[in-house]
Amino acid sequence: MERNILFVCLHGAAKSVLAAADCRRVAAERGLAIRTASAGTEPDPELAPSVHRTLTEEGADLAGQKPRRVSRADVAGAWRVVTFGCDLGEVAVPGVPVERWEDIPAVSDGLPAARKAIRARLERLLEEVAKP
């Protein structure tokens, strides 16, 4: 069964983009059927340059990807929503589980530290996805 995981941060330009890309990659390595998406509650016009550069260097296809505003339909279609320091507000949907990853360092304070914290949380999340 394919599961949809939605990652949401304030600007939709850094943490949520990193988490979605890393989650997709690790899930594929493990043979897990998931889809990921990223969005923001107050989206920036462009992806964070350091995130774009890092993911592109690793082979991620980010062509045409820009931060976008999270919608109620995004949330309703998710198996799980992960937020980074923001509230879903009026787009929250009753019954859709939301995890708040509040302890992730800001990408602007150092992408490696933020990524390490995201990956640690992804490990637990993907273990849950793998359960029948």
Image: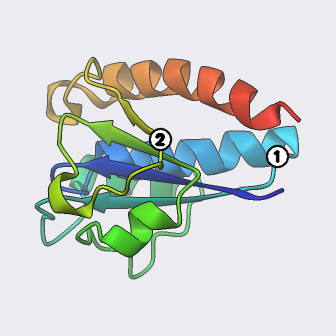
Give the SS element for disc 1.
loop
* Residue type, numbered disc 2: Pro
Q: Is residue 129 above or below residue 119?
A: below
| Residue 62 point in image, percent of width and height | 46, 69
Q: Which residue is mark 1?
A: 32
| Residue 110 point in image, percent of width and height | 23, 25
* Residue type, numbered disc 1: Leu
| Residue 20 point in image, percent of width and height | 50, 50
Q: Which residue is mark 2?
A: 97
For the N terminus, give its image quadrant: bottom right
For the C terminus, give its image quadrant: top right
Q: Is residue 73 above or below residue 98?
A: below
Q: Residue, x 62% and y 21% (percent of image)?
A: 124
Measure how far apart labels 1 and 2 are at the Cα level. 20 Å
| Residue 38 point in image, percent of width and height | 40, 59
Q: Is residue 65 above or below residue 59?
A: below
Position of 87 compared to 74: left or right? left
Residues 92 and 81: in front is: 92
